Amino acid sequence: MRPFLTLALLACPALFADPLAQIYDNQVNSVERDVLRLAQAMPADKYNFAPTNGTFTGVRTFGTQVKHIATYLYMLSSAILTEKPPVDIGTTDNGPDALQTKAQIIAYFKGSVAYAHKAVATITPQNLMDPVTLPGESRPRARIAAANMISWHSFDHYGQMV
């Protein structure tokens, strides 16, 4: 019985997570579930789709939207962790130009979600107000602002993709 209990506890790190970190991890779970499901559902030959009727000149393609969300996840997570992203995120907020296929873009997105999970796991009541620099900003803001942006920014672009 004891070995089973020990294994069960080791398999559930969320039981030991800070409640604040768990709230943000649940938000990352939502981004992962909804955006990944949509990205996987889109046929590979439609990843270059962008609307052209009306005033849609210059909007991101579907694939670029996925890369953009992933790039922001990497940037926000690196701000939370106060470190450089673990992968090449490219020179713009649209991600690396080298990522062109559906498989490459989905792998990049999955990596960004894993990094976001790592980042939000470090948020505690003691460090949530520590200053960090968010993507595209020169003035530091509270670490919690980066954690909040993970969800709302991702779902803003999810809405555009839908």
Image: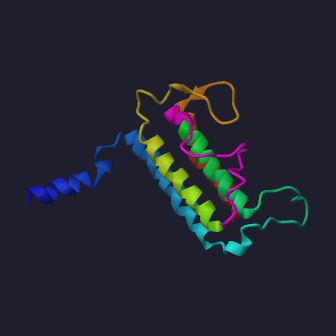
Residue 144 is a magenta residue: no
Name the magenta segment's main secondary structure.
loop
Horizontal arrangement in the rendering, residue 29 relative to residue 44 (left or right): left
Res 157 quadrant in image? bottom right
Question: x and y percent of residue 151 in the render?
Answer: 57, 48
Question: x and y percent of residue 36 in the render?
Answer: 56, 63
| Residue 156 in sight | no
Q: Which residues are magenta?
A: 79-101
Give me the residue at 86% from left, 59% from top: 56
The quarter of the picture where the C terminus appears is bottom right
Give me the residue at 41% from left, 42% from top: 121
Residue 52 vertical position relative to residue 89 in the rendered view, above or below: below
Horizontal arrangement in the rendering, residue 20 relative to residue 2 (left or right): right
Residue ranking furthest to the front: 98
Give me the residue at 61% from left, 73% from top: 41
Give me the residue at 14% from left, 60% from top: 4
Residue ranking furthest to the left: 1
Res 84 quadrant in image? top right
Question: x and y percent of residue 34 in the render?
Answer: 56, 62
Residue 85 is a magenta residue: yes
Front-most of residues 56 and 87: 87
